[in-house]
Each structure stands twice: as C-alpha cells, then as structure tokens.
Image (tube, rainbow, N blue to C red):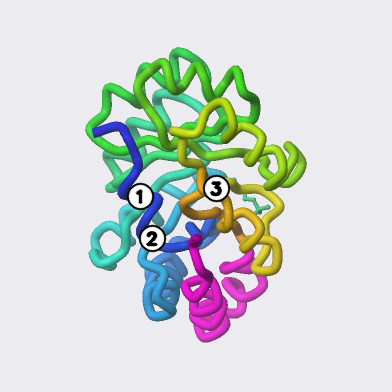
Amino acid sequence: MANATGVLHVSPVIPVVTIDEPQYAVPLARALADGGVRIIELTLRTDSALESLKRIANEVPDILLGAGTILTPGQADAAVAAGAQFLVSPGVTPSLLDHMLALDVPVLPGVATVGEVMAVLERGLDTMKFFPAGPAGGPEYLAAIGAPIPQVRFCPTGGISLNSAPGYLALPNVSCVGGSWLTPRSAIENQDWQQITQLAQGAASLRVE
Ligand code: 3PG
C-alpha cells in the first residue's frame, strides 16, 4: 500500500508541522481538525517529534497522521512504530525508497527534477511530493512536467502560502499542496489554537480544480 493517492485527497492543504513541546501536539492536531483539516505531516525535526506522533496517534484518531522529513530508514521505522500512517521524505535515495516501500504505509517521496520523477515512477509510485516547490520552479515547472508525464500527481511543498496555493491547485497534476503557514511557531508557543483553527478553515476552503 505504498501509493499515497488517498493521502492527497483528504484536504487541499497538508499542514507541515514542527512541534518542540509534545504537550502541544494534541491541542494543535485538534485545532486543525476543528478547522476542517484532518491530516497532518509532523516533521521529525525535533528531538521530541516521535513523542508528539505517539500522542496524536493515541488521542486524535480522526486525523490522518503522517511523519515528514524522513531522511533515513531508521527514521521511517521509528515513525511507523510511533503511529505514523504515511511517510513523507524531502528527497529520495534508492536505499531509503526501498526501505519505505517495504513498510505497510503510503509513501510520498520528495522529487524536484524530471529524472527523479521518472526514477520514482519506475518503482511503481505515481504520487510524489514536489519539493522545494517555489525555488524549484513553481506552478510553471509542474505544468511543464505534466506534458511528458501526465500520470503523476504531486503535492508541491516549500514556499507556498494561502495566496500562492491556488496557482498550484489549478493544475491537473496537483491534488493538494503542503505548507507550514497553517501552524506558525508563534501561535503554537502562545497556544493560540483559535488562530490555527482559523488558518485551517482558510486552507480547507481552497478549491482543488
Ligand atoms: C517541508 O518540509 O515541506 C517544508 O519545510 C515546508 O515548507 P514551507 O515552510 O515553506 O511551507
């Protein structure tokens, strides 16, 4: 069950979330769900990320829980053991892809070039994260990839905002976008869950063409 087609259709935006304090993980996930965003990519960028994953997995069952910033096979194993229901990597190496494909969860490998798209497609996946979307070329670049390779569906992430998201979501090969703008660090530190719910509402109301 490596293809992540279902993951791409839960919400127009997958929030990319970094949490320092595990005590904030559950209220933050609930705030997103209250705003209509029932999916989260929790990055493994903090020492406590696995603990945050476990708490969300145990206490917020109505959110689809992903682990992001997977760089090594060990991180993939640890994330799944902590309760991650899908895995996201910023890029791919052959060994990391092999390992993630052997796990029983959907996988969104990161790609940024046509060759990388072809390499992942060769492994049987037609859903990918396009990262870093803005610096790599934005909607124009994705539209160009869609000409020779129309069968791949992307979740572009990196440098996307509420204002720039519609330019991506209008493309036939984009099913959702990812972004950290729904969960600003200041809102998390101030425990301003209402602000996160409002940002989630804005994201949930985006139209996927
Ligand atoms: C990611 O890992 O996908 C990015 O860090 C998110 O990018 P953004 O912060 O520019 O939204």
Mark 1 or mark 3: which is in front?
1
Q: Residues within 10 Å of mark 3 (few under 14, many from 20)?
A: few
Which tag, 1 or 3, sits closer to the chain's start? 1
Residue drawn where x is 33% and y is 31% of the image? 77
The label number, if any, that marks residue 39 in the structure image: 2
Q: Nearer the viewer, mark 1 or mark 2?
A: 1
Q: Return the residue at label 3.
A: 46
Mark 1 nearby-residue class (10 Å; few <14, some 14–19, many ≥20): many
Going by the numbered disc 3, the residue's amino acid type is Thr
Query: Is 164 placed above or below 94 here?
Result: below
Quick check: 67 left or right of 148? Answer: left
> In the rendered image, is residue 84 in sight?
no
Q: Could you say which quadrant of the image residue 125 lies in?
A: top left
| In-image side of 127 versus 134 (left or right) | left
Question: Residue 139: horizontal and vertical position, in percent?
Answer: 68, 47
Q: CA distance from mark 2 to mark 3?
A: 20 Å
Residue labelled with disc 1:
7
**Regarding mark 2 in the picture, which secondary structure is present there?**
strand
